[in-house]
Each structure stands twice: as C-alpha cells, then as structure tokens.
Image: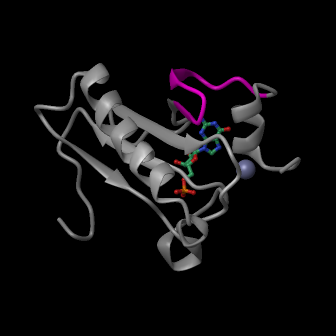
C-alpha cells in the first residue's frame, strides 16, 4: 500500500533500525520504546489488522520470528511480552499488522 508507513519500511523506502529481515518478515526498533527492548515485527505484505490475517503460515512465521529475536536480544530467558493491538479499542495506531516485542524489564499491562 503506497501510503502505509510500515509498507514503506518493508520496501526500503524508509529505513528504520532493523534488527531482523528475511523474505517475508521485517523487524525493527520502535521509535518510541516503552521498554529497553521494544521491537516491532511486521509481515512485508500489507495486512491491515489481525482481523485480516488469513494465512496461518505467515501467522506462525511472525510468532517464530518474535521468539528468534528475543533470543538475539538476550531476553528469551528473562522473559518478554508480545502484544498485538487490533483496531480502535485495542489501541492500534498504525494499520499494518505488527507484533510488539517488549522486554528488558518487568512489563506491566492491564492483564498484569
Ligand atoms: P500500535 O499502537 O499501532 O500497536 O503501535 C504502533 C507503534 O509504532 C508505536 O509503538 C509507535 O511508537 C511505533 N511507530 C510509529 N511510527 C514509527 C516510525 O516511524 N518508526 C518506528 N520505528 N516506529 C514507529
Ligand atoms: Zn502496509
């Protein structure tokens, strides 16, 4: 999608601080980190929200990538939290599916 921020990152038009990339997935540091490790993992194809993710292989790949990056960032053992915000009540601000990986400190949330 031409006017989607994360599509521009996936295509290389905008260059975020990339921590992982393969053919289908890109991961980069959040510009406004809420924890010492705060990384966003996105599919390279445009998927607006979790409601639009109809590809189980891609869903699995995104989750496996989160776990791989947690290892890479050294937080796999100490722990981390993965969040997907969906639509307005879920707090989604960027309408290109992304998984937040938060770690490096105790992560608080409404679920505690
Ligand atoms: P959401 O609320 O949609 O789940 O999260 C969007 C996230 O994207 C936010 O944590 C925000 O800080 C991050 N973000 C927004 N614009 C940019 C940007 O230009 N670069 C990077 N690296 N992160 C961004
Ligand atoms: Zn997009």
Task: Say which residue appears at 55% left-offset and 22% top-offset.
Answer: 18
Task: Say which residue appears at 49% left-offset and 40% top-offset.
Answer: 40
Q: Residue furthest left?
A: 77
Q: Quadrant of the C terminus?
A: bottom left
Above or below — where is 96 with respect to 79?
A: below
The percent position of residue 77, horizontal first and vertical second, equals: 11, 31
Q: Residue furthest bottom?
A: 89
* Apparent side of residue 81 relative to residue 32 in the rendered image (left or right): left
The percent position of residue 33, horizontal first and vertical second, equals: 45, 38
Task: Say which residue appears at 65% left-offset and 58% top-offset.
Answer: 47
* Apparent side of residue 86 relative to residue 77 in the rendered image (left or right): right
Above or below — where is 80 with respect to 94?
A: above
* Apparent side of residue 104 relative to residue 47 in the rendered image (left or right): left
Say whether residue 75 is magenta.
no
Task: Say which residue appears at 60% left-offset and 29% top-offset.
Answer: 23
Question: Which of 88 and 51 lies nearest the eye of the viewer?
Answer: 51
Q: How many marks?
A: 0
The percent position of residue 64, horizontal first and vertical second, equals: 34, 40
Above or below — where is 45 with respect to 91?
A: above
The percent position of residue 57, horizontal first and vertical second, equals: 46, 51
Q: Which residues are magenta?
A: 14-27
Q: Quadrant of residue 69?
A: top left
Q: Residue furthest right?
A: 2
Q: Quadrant of residue 21?
A: top right
Q: Quadrant of residue 22?
A: top right
């Amino acid at each position: 999608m031409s006017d989607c921020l994360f599509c521009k990152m996936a295509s290389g038009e905008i260059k975020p601080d990339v921590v992982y990339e393969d053919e289908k997935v890109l991961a980069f540091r959040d510009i406004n980190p809420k924890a010492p490790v705060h990384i966003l993992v996105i599919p390279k194809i445009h998927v607006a929200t979790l409601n639009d993710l109809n590809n189980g292989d891609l869903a699995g790949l995104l989750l496996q990538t989160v776990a791989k990056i947690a290892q890479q960032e050294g937080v796999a053992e100490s722990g981390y939290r993965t969040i997907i915000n969906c639509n307005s009540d879920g707090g989604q601000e960027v309408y290109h599916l992304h998984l937040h990986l938060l770690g490096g400190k105790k992560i608080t949330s409404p679920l505690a």
